[in-house]
Amino acid sequence: MHQSTRTVNVGLIGLGTVGGGVFQLIESHAEKYRRAYGIDLRIARACGLDESRARELGVTAEQFTTDWRDVVSDPRIDIVVEVIGGEHPATEIFTEAFAAGKHVVSANKALLGRHMAELAGAASAAGVQLRCEASCGGGIPIVGTLEHDLTGNNILAIAGIVNGTTNYILSRMTTEGLGYEEVLADAQRLGYAEADPTADVDGFDAASKIAILSSIGFTTRITTDDVYMQGIRKISAEDIEVARELGYAIKMLAIGRRTDEGVDIRVHPAMIPASHPLAGVNGAMNAVYVVGDAVGETMFYGAGAGAFPTASAIVGDVMNLAEDISAGVKPLPEPAPFARELPIRNVADLETRYYVRLTADGTDGVATGATEVLNQHGVTVERVIPRENGSFALLTDTCREGNMFAALGALSGAAAAVEVANVIRIEDIADWTQGVEAN
Amino acid sequence: MHQSTRTVNVGLIGLGTVGGGVFQLIESHAEKYRRAYGIDLRIARACGLDESRARELGVTAEQFTTDWRDVVSDPRIDIVVEVIGGEHPATEIFTEAFAAGKHVVSANKALLGRHMAELAGAASAAGVQLRCEASCGGGIPIVGTLEHDLTGNNILAIAGIVNGTTNYILSRMTTEGLGYEEVLADAQRLGYAEADPTADVDGFDAASKIAILSSIGFTTRITTDDVYMQGIRKISAEDIEVARELGYAIKMLAIGRRTDEGVDIRVHPAMIPASHPLAGVNGAMNAVYVVGDAVGETMFYGAGAGAFPTASAIVGDVMNLAEDISAGVKPLPEPAPFARELPIRNVADLETRYYVRLTADGTDGVATGATEVLNQHGVTVERVIPRENGSFALLTDTCREGNMFAALGALSGAAAAVEVANVIRIEDIADWTQGVEAN
């Protein structure tokens, strides 16, 4: 154990769900941090808008402020924890904290998804650290793992179930055979989904997270705007049933893969083999599957949200900084590996297999006709699965996404008797280990 | 990216499977480490006993030596990587490297399982780091996760599938319905088990790993000798079949739990719910399940052995040190949190449920008689499962292990008609989240 030379002072900005968790975790565990790690960690200031909420949490009058500037300007404070979210005033908090020589720990995926390179660069230039373990995967230590533990590898692929709301909805649709709308309404009632579920169900939240994880894993610059997104609104109980019959689970995946043509970066529902570890991640739990060329396949599993899991990630970042500060050492600024810009591959160049569900009026030969249209566009149908009322599902061989959507366009135009109800990519994740060193 | 001020020199001791992997990984990825992290990492010396093996790996005449003292005494070398295993000369390598002011990165679970507290203390006293990510769980970043990322938590429980050989054997027994001896022979033929499988199948290897992980997670001193061990030799195809019928999988678990009476630390086969994430970890893969009071349930999954997965863990440790060294900063010695000694709970005080398989001669009333004997010792039988030829299995309610074994002793003594074929603990892992903060 180090002899602690001094107290480490934290300034907490945000006293909502996560901020409250951070406050309570540090206050209740301070004695443990002293005893086990020799670190004397204190919350010097805590900023929130609601003083009665602050009082309930146990924030003292001395700690409490409603003005974030009181926190970033406090000369005692070593580490600013920003858990208010959104772009403003978070950006100003980061900037002024850096200018004052303070490290920043943040859970702000929306801001970091768009501006990590600039913010990490600003921290590095100011000689301080910006840490963001809690921005991705809640309590799962995945940012630190990519940033510090798997650095011996070329990371080849990242596939995450990083949005608890969509995983909760798809899990319940799967176990209970219910429809999307019904489960969404229930999720909203239970607090698993927002009144406006757009950020979750259309993939924005997951896009921020995979942009951050891929930037770190591939040491390049990727922003949320680079991410191809497709949501889960069109997934039906029937899609899930067909998937199960075929040995697949449908999961909302956030995917980053290195390819020879650049980084393949996308968020969408996908069929994955039911035997894959990601397929067993259910409810609001999260998991991130990572393939490195040396380590091979890994997966990291845990609670993707919640006051205390998120606080665990934030306090982990704080403790990593505090270990140095407490011993009288200045934490080294993190390397900011976001200068390199690998190209982003166009999703039209994706090559994968597809599941296509078609509703039809029962006319003879519709499936054969559809198969021919796909064939003419270079898409081979591997299997036709008849469903009720003359409808059917097709499974294709591996083909280029551009060809696939051209084929579907032609199909919709050619045959009034058939309508494309849904298209889901089939991800053969086991093949992603190509490029892993043999052992 | 930092401006690298200087080259970081590694001295590699051991050129076997893992050492070869480390050599090849650093040599093939050096350009990546420079480009992505600004770290110029080189292998200055490489020590092995077999020069032709070294030549095949690409070790140059300048790098090669057969004397480990050439490595630890080389003034250029910053970091010594020890991958020879065993107690000697590994202990001397550690000691002399520390004395020479060099950091040590090691995969030596046998040595660290017994002597981590002393060795970590010696490193700390010398002002250098001892890192051992590769000692537990192969490529899975679990040591760093417990040491650096989950430090905000009180770790409540650790349960690992940390021995690939036993997991491979149990997995094949499960999927193919084969017996232990048959699968062991095949595993030996395929290189998944040693000619003398004792270290793996009797739990010694897993015991070292859970001693290391629990010491770090619970910030206390636990050694391999503290670990209660029971191997997998008695597990039969029938046990696995009964388990499956009851909704359980049988896994070789390495368990560390904090209890009010001390640390519960043990390695043995256990029945766990088939729906638990650990139950899906098959073949030679490893996983470590960790419960923290803030983060809740987490699991970390990956390859538990192999040249490149293990090299990934070692090079991760090397890169963490190299980041500082490369920037001209002396890495801070790790805190050595092994001073505190939580008591070790006696396994007789364990309270759990049990599966007991009894062979019997088919006499009427044997099951009833056995149930009565157990009852007299305070063990309630919850269910009797008749098997072929008059044999049967019992499931007990939660009881104290001391009572259970007293009951079984009495049973063996009392009834010539019945014989205890196997006893397997049933672990209701979901209950281990008691003590997790509500969210």
Image (spheres, coloured by chain):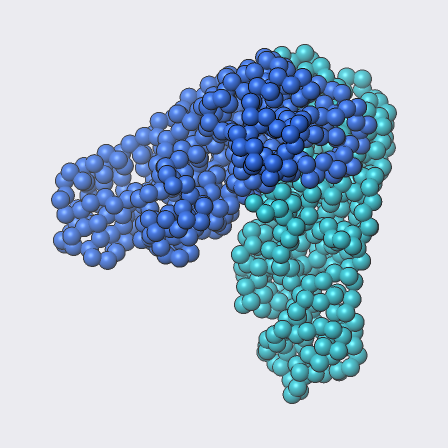
Chain colours: A cyan, B blue
Instruction: Decide: is B219 above or below B299.
Output: above
Look at the image and tell me whether residue B161 can be seen: yes
Which quarter of the figure has residue B268? top left
Q: Measured from the top left, where is residue B158 in percent x and y? A: 49, 35
Which quarter of the figure has residue A66? top right
Q: Residue at x 75, y 82 (%)?
A: A415
Q: Measured from the top left, where is residue A255 in percent x and y? A: 70, 52
Query: Nearest the camera: B381 or B91?
Result: B91
Q: Measured from the top left, where is residue A30 in percent x and y? A: 61, 21
Label total for image: 0
Taking the view exactly as shown, the residue that stands out farthest to the bottom is A364
In the image, A43: left or right of B133?
right
Instruction: Decide: is B236 above or below A388.
Output: above
Q: Residue at x 14, y 43 (%)?
A: B415
Q: Measured from the top left, where is residue B149 in percent x and y? A: 62, 31
Which quarter of the figure has residue B349? top left
Look at the image and tell me whether residue A71 can be seen: no
Q: Residue at x 70, y 83 (%)?
A: A369
Query: Nearest the camera: A105 or A67?
Result: A105
Quadrant that contains the N terminus of chain B: top right
Quadrant that contains the C terminus of chain B: top right
Q: Residue at x 67, y 21 (%)?
A: B78
Query: Nearest the camera: B245 or A329?
Result: A329
